[in-house]
Image (cartoon, rainbow, N blue to C red):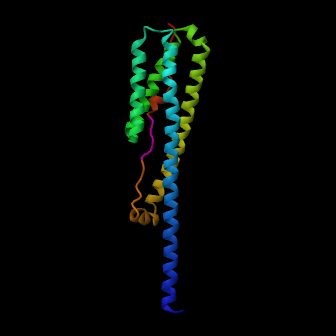
């Protein structure tokens, strides 16, 4: 075989690999961005439900202003963090918001009429549904981040990743304490 033919064949194989690796990294990067966007959609849905929940609870527990203020501040902080795109700030804000929402639901235990209110029950169910969807969106995001980060680190795709400036992404980590249900006491 002619040397130039061998070099051409090697160049085609290497070029083909570079194209495949680049396209694979682009695909993973886009899936990560889509998954991150899904988290934002679900968070916005939850953020939009919170003012309605607060107004419903206010009618029954108007003297609990500290709790309402805490939830409102946590919601605003979460919205701002979500808009910033900083993963660590978002995780901290989401943890605070989850804790604040738990305090509203714990507060409702002291008001039997509120617990029986259909509007409150519907809002509570919608928030639980939103929380479940956010959790699923985070898992999907983290799975895609893990795949992207693996490709960025693995040999030989790490050379392609470096060549085209692909960067590792941060996982969306929620503190374990934010996932533990509050204890309600009737004593």
Image coordinates of residue 92 in percent, x first then y, are 39, 33
Q: Nearer the viewer, residue 109 or 54?
A: 54
When the figure is inspected, residue 105 is found, relative to residue 9, above or below; the finding is above
**Left or right: 45, with 77 as reference point:** right
Can the viewer see residue 10 in this picture?
A: yes
Image coordinates of residue 28 in percent, x first then y, are 51, 55
Which residue is pictured at 52% across the width and 76% down the height? 13
Image coordinates of residue 144 in percent, x first then y, are 52, 50
Q: Which of 49 and 146 is in front in this view?
A: 49
Q: Is 83 included in the stretch rendered in magenta?
A: no
Which residue is pictured at 52% across the width and 47% down the height? 34
Image coordinates of residue 141 in percent, x first then y, are 51, 45
> Magenta stretch?
170-174
Which residue is pictured at 49% across the width and 75% down the height? 14
Q: In which quarter of the image is the N terminus?
A: bottom right
Q: Is the magenta stretch mostly helix, strand or loop?
A: loop
Q: Quadrant of residue 120?
A: top right
When the figure is inspected, residue 54 is found, relative to residue 18, above or below; the finding is above
């Amino acid at each position: 075989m002619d040397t130039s033919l061998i070099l051409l064949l090697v160049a085609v194989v290497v070029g083909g690999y570079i194209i495949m690796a680049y396209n694979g990294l682009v695909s993973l990067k886009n899936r990560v961005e889509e998954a991150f966007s899904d988290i934002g959609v679900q968070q916005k849905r939850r953020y939009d439900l919170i003012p309605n929940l607060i107004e419903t609870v206010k009618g029954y527990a108007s003297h609990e202003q500290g709790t309402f203020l805490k939830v409102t501040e946590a919601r605003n902080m979460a919205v701002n963090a979500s808009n910033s795109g900083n993963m660590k700030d978002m995780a901290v804000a989401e943890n605070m918001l989850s804790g604040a929402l738990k305090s509203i639901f714990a507060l409702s235990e002291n008001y039997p009429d509120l617990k029986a209110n259909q509007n409150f029950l519907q809002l509570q169910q919608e928030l639980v549904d939103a929380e479940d969807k956010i959790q699923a969106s985070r898992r999907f995001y983290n799975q895609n981040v893990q795949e992207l980060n693996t490709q960025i680190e693995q040999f030989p795709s790490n050379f392609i990743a470096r060549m085209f400036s692909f960067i590792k992404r941060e996982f969306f980590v929620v503190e374990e304490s934010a996932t533990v249900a509050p204890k309600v006491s009737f004593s």
